[in-house]
Structure formats: structure tokens, C-alpha cells
Amino acid sequence: MKIDEQLAMESKWQKKWEESGAFEADAREGQPKFFLNVPYPYMNGYLHLGFGVTFLHAEILARHMRMRGYNVLMPQAFHCTGLPIVAAANRISEGEEMQFGIMRDMGIPQDEIVRFNDPVHWTKYFPPQAMIDLKSLGASVDWRRSFITTRLNPFYDSFVKWQFRKLKDNGFVRLGEHPVIWCPKDEAPVGDHDRLEGEGETPAEFVLLKFPIDGKFLLAATLRPETVYGQTNLWVNPDIEYKEVRVGSEIWVVSEEATRKLAEQKKDVEVVGSVSGRDFVGKTVRAPVIGSEIPVLPSKFIDQAKGTGIVTSVPSDAPDDWIALKDLQEDEKTLAEFDLDPDEIKDIAPIAIITSEGWGPLPAVEIVDRMGIENQMERDKLEKAKDEIYRTGYYTGVMNEDCGDISGMKVEEAKDVIKRKMIEAGEADILYEPSGEVICRCLTPAVVKLVRDQWFLDYGDPEWKKLTYEALEKMRLLPEISRRQFEYVVDWLREWACAHHHGLGTSLPWDENWVIESLSDSTIYMSYYTFCHLLPEGSADKVDDDFFDYVLFESGDAKSVAEKTGIDVETLDAMRNEFLYWYPFDLRNSGKDLVQNHLVFCIFNHVAIFPQESWPRAFGVNGFVKLEGQRMSKSHGIVTYIRHAIKAWGADVTRITLAQGGEGLDDPSFDVDFADSIGRKLRQWMRFALSDHETRGDVQPIDRWFRSVMNRAVGRYNEAMELLYLRTALKHAYFDLQGDWNWYLRRCNDIPNSELLADFVELQTMLLAPFVPHVCEEIWEGIGKEGFVSLARLPETDEDSIKVELEASEKFFRNTLDDVRQISKATGMTPARLVFYTHPEWMANMFETAVGLRKEGRLEVGVLMKEAMKDDLVRASSKQASKWAPKLVDQVTKMKPSDVTMFSQCIDEKNYLEESKGFLEREFKCEVSIFTADDPERHDPGSRATGARPWRPAIFIE
RNA sequence: GCGAGGGUAGCCAAGACUGGUCAAAGGCGACAGACUCAAGAUCUGUUCCAGAAGUGGUUCCGGGGUUCAAAUCCUCGCCCUCGCACCA
């Protein structure tokens, strides 16, 4: 079948599903339900395979559960909230080439790209496209319940407002201030996606130390406030014009660059003058905390862009300070230039303050020596030195006894204590700046802005955390191994800034100037899926809090809600009923990147708003798709859209390839070779299923064997599917089963039992249907079944047809065959005659005795002999028995528990081989004879018979 | 740096919690054979090394350890992935 025939076949079934409403799910009393969903994808482009993997995990399970008899709901909405769409639209209107390139790569015609200059156009264009993609992927979604977010959807808008009023009423929303990386030109926060440089950089907190001088303050910035006890002097750059800034009632002296930072972070800031650094050199200032006078000295190593352009000097622990001090002490010219007393300067010595592992009292002195740093200009070496000291100092360091109140504290904790103390005493302040250089996409270097009156969701609230933890404990996590990460995140989350001033979304109900950000308007919307398809058009502006209170909590009065909203009571009750029936959801699946925010927010918000019986039941988490080992991501350019994959391979192959890519948290890979190969196999399977075969009516042991194997496979498949181990499920239900079927055909000389053949084709088709639904529908129809396979009922495992002894016998047979092959290979012989010698009867008795002892846990050589000798047959061969006993004990001890069960009862091996003699002769194309090892009549020219053991006949090849 | 998950044969990937039939499932690729006029598809076999008897040797990122026994448990180190916040 060519790809276009394949696609035509697939869309034929997609149309049939849609026309018949096969996947539209309504509350049905008496039938168990299963409600799955995945986070709605963001609508700034076509859907890519990354979303495909996440989606398919849920979708495939949805199809599986449907076939297990559940009433399954799988809805899908689309996310438009937030900045990226707006930012991208702006870039289009600015004519930015990069953005045009992205649009072209998606396959949007050049003359249509300009229409994307309006954010609203994105929200109209992409959701239908995403629907097309998912439908052509064979999604079994109830599309009646789809929607988009933001105020563009007034119903959803009301829902989010209701949610936020609830959160606020319950005391989970509060006001505070918050530093963000900020673009002064755009006057907007610069998220990672909007950065040309500096991905991952965050606001870092500097402590500003105030040094009073002439009624003003010199402001020195430091990342290590705990080192104030080691201050010996202050550094200023004599060649710089510093600015005098009025901050509140104080005048601060800082670099020009720093004035801009202050403007974004402090209230009431005004530049009032300027002063040369030179003016301060030689003067003394009183250092904060320690209170002693220290000299202001000249230095040129200070980076003016960083901090305030003024640095306090701690030569004991800062290599920069130590080397600068040393330089100056030896630099007579500079000393003279600034009229500094050489003796006084030379008297300045580092003050030891921190004791840390592997270091002496003066780490900076030590490391400058060790690394052979000569002067202040060796910036790279100095950076490295600083890093090294800071790392060990921070984690292992302890403040020594000369550090006042913080003596004896660990550096980690001293830092905070001293900072707070200084700020309280008015000796210090805070300044944020990006932890590394950040450049906005508009080419402007970013700064840190302190956003005031910021609304937060207070995820730090201990009571709230406690409830969330409780909910998490009761949840099922797939895979379970992700639990530690969830626990960590619940613990670690603090306030979350839940609204901003830009982007699409819903405004805060109590303050229209704020727009709720995208991770906060998407936490409980799974409940909205349950009833949104019943919202009547035209009631958009009337749906209010009372409405949601009624539908979700049945609080209030139906009649008055009906009057207010114009939605009749019956419809209201139907919505209420849908919610009650479907909620909570049974599984939400997502990429692993959402564990640390979205999924945990989802729990937080559920426990804040809903009663316990509506809390989430399970989360599934999966990795990111890799294409040939490379991560797919938009920013890295390697993107494969769902539609491109479908065009190349069709929906079925795309689905099964993604499903078998990998399990658990590992990143699954999209294996192109596998896709090609599985496509061939599926076509082959369809041909096989739909063609006529020669069959027979009689039932042979091998038929019972395959039926046993088949039923066992179903059990394993169900187990794996429930845990979302799709690859494992495919292995059991498809690859292994196909292999067993091939073996079965070989064993019955290519003439299968007719009933078994029909059952196998039917079952295999059902097992594959969740993965490759289209080809399975085609087969289902072809073999004359009514209705869709997608809606067929998977039979329960028939425990009675699982026959352990039959499977053991066949395993024995295959092992024996393998042995023959191994011997042939090792000897290079092609058998001209094959002779098998099965174990003598006494061995079986002794073997079973050994297994019995193992089960009782008292298998030892002595015990075994004593027990086995009670048997007449064993006693008759006592000499051989005692020789065999140690080996037997060893062998049985090492058996897997599963094999102990499988091989505990010996079988009539001679008879089993006899029955398959014809098969053996066909396989090896030679004469085959079978003897018991103690048969005096046996043909045994190689004296092999003595090697026979239970489950392992001796073999002789001529 | 912090938190979480990983590193298994040519490649992808099970196994690890509960140590032993583990030279390690399955898939992909490769090679050989059967079928075929041929190719493809399909089926069968091989795919760490050695081997004229079903075996032996050396393996599961690297070092050290526990144990009769380690891919599996402990420890140290190296490397990879995800996340670290207002951003979807």
C-alpha cells in the first residue's frame, strides 16, 4: 500500500468515527468511567511530535480503557494565554526576518504571514489546525468539549475569574513585590524565550553596604555580606565620575550604570549631582557593622557595570581585593600620586574571618600564591580563584570567633542573618541584577525591575502545602519513580506571581489592569471539560460565579441561576450531572518539564477549591521525543510537526513509532528505521488477516499451547497498559505474540486450527487497535465484524486456558532444539541422524523431591539424599543418585521462582518428543530416534545417554 | 551550585526495587539460508571472543567495597537529560 492509499484509508475511518460520534462521551449511570486529559498545547504554531508523545500516551490508554468496557472521556482544548503569541505577532508587525522564517518553516504562505501581526489571528488560525492534526492522527477525542482560553472565550474567562475569586476568598492570593529580569525598552519582563542571550539567568541579590561620608553615602555592592568583618578598606575607581543620587531622604554615591538599576528598583530616585572617584581617595569612612574607620583606596579592577562601581575590600577571602592591595602596596608611584602614606598602606593586612575545609585562615592569599597570580589584570585566573573559594567557603565555611554576632555560624546561614541585621539597622540595602548578561530580543541589555504590588498565589502557605501533600500521597504517579520530584517541588514552591501586565488572558476579577498568567489559568480547567459542551450560545455574558457554584458545588438555587443566566434548570442539572459523573479525572499525562510547575499547581489549586473527592487521581509523566538522538525543540530548529510525520508515514505508523520510543522518564526516540519497518509489518499483518488460509478442525496439543500463550499475553498487556508502559505492552501483545504464532505455524506444519486462527486474528487486531486504530478497523471490517473495533470489547483473560505444564513442555522442546543447534554450530556438523535420550524415571522423582525441598527452603545435599532415598526407584540407583545430588542442589537453588513453578513437575519427555518426531525430522531433515537413557535397547554409539537429566535430554548427533 | 532521572552489546531499549537459568528480553540494523526467474515482502538462523558436543572466557560508564555469588546492593568519581520560577 502506498502512503496516499494509507492516508485515504485512515481518513475514511476518521470520517466514520466522526460521523457516528463514536468518541463523544456522555455521563452514563451504571457504566464505570475513565477521564483522561493532557495539558492543552500552546497555540503559537502547529503541533509537534513532542506534544504528540504526551497526547498519545493518554490517547492510546483512552482507546484501551474504552475496549475494557469503560465509558471514556478524552477532551482536548487549546491554550492561548500569555506573552509568546503577542510577542511573535509584534515581531511580525515589526517585520522581523527571524519570525518570518519561523512562519515559513511551518509552511505558511508568504503572503499570509503578515496577517499574523494580530495576536487574535493566531488564536483563530492555529486551534482548528491543531484539531486537524489530531484528527488525522486518529485521536479519539470528544471534540464537542474543545475550547480556547483567554477572554476571547467569555465562558472560560468567567470560569477563571470564578476560580480566582474562590482562591482569593480562601486566602491563597496575596500582594507583594518581586524582582524580574526586565527590558527597559519594551517595559516588560524578559522571559527565557525572549532572550537573545542569557537563557537561565535570574535576578541575583547584591547587598548594598552604606559608608557614610560628608553627609552622603558611598554604596558598595557585595554578594558576600558575611565577609563584612574582614573589611580593610574601600575601593573606588579614581578615573570615574560617580553620580550622586537621592534615594528617599539619603544621597547615595554610585556609578552611572547603577543609577539606572536603582531607578527600576527603588522608590523616589533622583540624580542630583556627580563627583569624581578621585575626590574620595585617601579619605576614611566608617564601615558598617564593624564600625571602624577604613581608608578609601584607588583601584581600576572594578567593573563599573556590575553592582555600584564601588567595592568593599576583604583581602582575606576575595582574591581580587588581596591582589589589588598587594599591587598598591608596591606601587609607589600611585601612592605618591594620591598622596597616600606608604607606611600606613603597607600596614593594611587581611583579617581572618572564615574557617573552611581545606583552607588556612586566609584563603585569598593562599590561592593567589598557589595559582601564581601576578596582578589585578589576570581576570580569568582571578575569576576561577573566586569561584573555588566561594564554593568551599559557602558550603563548609564557619565564621570564626572574631565575627561578632555571627561567630560560629555556618557561612550559609551567617549570610542571611547579617544581611537582615544590616538592613534593619539602616546600614545596608538590596540591589538586584541579572546573574549574567541578558540581552532582550530587541537587542536591549536587560536589567532587574522590582515589580511592586505584584499579585501572588501563596504556594508557600504551610497549610496549603499540607493539603497538597495529602492529595499527592493518595495519587497514582506513572511512573512511580517521579514521586520524589513531585514531593520536592511541593516543598520548594513559594509565592508564584500569578498575573502580569502583558499578554493574552483573563484579567484579575478585582483589578482589570492585571492579566492572569498562563500557568495560573490552567490549573483546574479539567473540570470545565465536563460541562462546557452544554453551555448554550448566547449566555456568555450571563454566566457568573453563581452559575459555577451551582454546577460544581450545587450551592445556590437552580431556579435563580436559571433566571439569571437564561440557561434552563434541566440544562443546569445536566451540567451538574456531567461534572459529578466525570470528576475527578483519572489520569492527566504530561511531559516531564511540567512536573515542577503545572502539575504541582494543578494539585495545589484542586485542594484549594475542591472537596477531597474531586482531587486528581493520577498523573502520567513522559520524556521528550528525540529524533535520531537529537532533542526536538523549537529554539533549536529541529522540529518535526505532527502533520509532517503523518504525511511521511501515516497516522498508524506515527502512533506506534512514538509509542514504542521509550518508557518512563527517559526521552523516547522517534526511530525512522522502526517506522519504515513497522509500516511493512502492519501491511503484512493486514494481508495475513484478510486472506484465506488452509485450516483444520481437530484440536492438537500445540493448539492448546498457543491458546495458553495468547491468554497469558492479554494479561501482561493489560497490566502494562494500565501503567502506561506502552512499549512493554506492544512487546507482549504484538512482537512476542507474533513470534509465538510463527512458532505455532511451524509446529503444525502451517495448517492452523480454524477456530484458533479466527480467535487469534480477532484478538491481535483488538490488542493493536489502541496503537494503530485505522488498520485495525480495516481488518475488523474485513473479517466481518460489526461496528468499530475501537468500540469492541476486549475479552477478559481466560484463566482456564492458561496451561502451565503445556507451556513448560513446549519450552523444554524449544530448549532441546536450541541445544541441537548449538551442538551443530560448535561441531560444524549437519545431523545425519539425531538421537535423544530422556532421563530415567528415578531422576524425575529425585528432581521433584529437590524442588519440593527448595519450596520449603531446606534444600541441602544431605537432606535431599535422605528424602530421595525413601523412593524405591532412587534407591535402586543410589550410586548415581549420590553423585548427581550436589549438582542437582546447585541447579535447583539457582532456579528463578517463576521457573520453579513452571518446571516443578516433570513431564513425559519421551512421549512429548515422540509426538513431535515428524516435526523434528522436517526441521533437521534427518532420521530421529528417541530412547530413555536406561533403555538397554538404545542406540548409543557415543555413550551420551548418561548425560540425560530432567528437562534436558542427552543428545547424540551422527 | 541545588533537586530529580539516567549511563546495558553496532544502534534503540528491558532487566536493577526483591543479588543467583543473565552472555543479559524485545526491536532496529547487519550477515547467511529458505521461498522466488529476479527483486521486495515473508519465514528461519547468526550477530562479545574462542570452540569438532550442548561449553569455557571476558562483559553492563570508571575506581573501590559488601557477598559463596553483583548489570542488580554500598561508596567515590566522570558523563548525559530535565527543572531551578513568573515562562509556555
Image: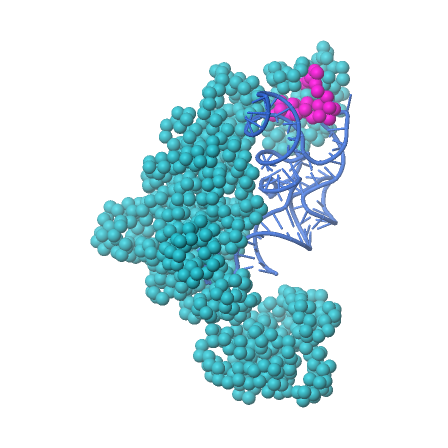
Chain colours: A cyan, B blue
Q: Position of residue A741 (x, y in %)?
A: 54, 25
Q: Position of residue A52 (x, y in %)?
A: 47, 45
Q: Quadrant of residue A864?
A: top right
Residue at the image position 31 percent from the left and 47 percent from the top: A533
* Total count of labels: 0
Q: Position of residue A923 (x, y in %)?
A: 63, 19
Q: Position of residue A576 (x, y in %)?
A: 30, 47
Q: Residue furthest front?
A: A111
Left or right of A548, for residue A673: right
Q: Quadrant of residue A464?
A: bottom left
Q: Quadrant of the C terminus of chain A?
A: top right
Q: Is residue A262 visible?
A: yes
Residue at the image position 34 percent from the left and 65 percent from the top: A512
Residue at the image position 76 percent from the left and 20 percent from the top: A879
Q: Is residue A837 magenta?
A: yes
Query: Where A438 sits versus A238, above or below?
Result: above
Residue at the image position 26 percent from the left and 56 percent from the top: A542
**Front residue (pair A603, A110):** A110
**Front residue (pair A148, A256):** A256
Left or right of A668, for residue B66: right
Query: Where B77 sits versus A304, above or below?
Result: above
Q: Is residue A875 visible?
A: no
Q: Residue furthest top?
A: A937
| Residue span colored magenta | A811-839
**Front residue (pair A157, A354):** A157
**Front residue (pair A313, A559):** A313
Q: Quadrant of residue A65?
A: top left
Q: Is residue A490 magenta?
A: no
Query: Where A782 sits versus A211, above or below?
Result: above
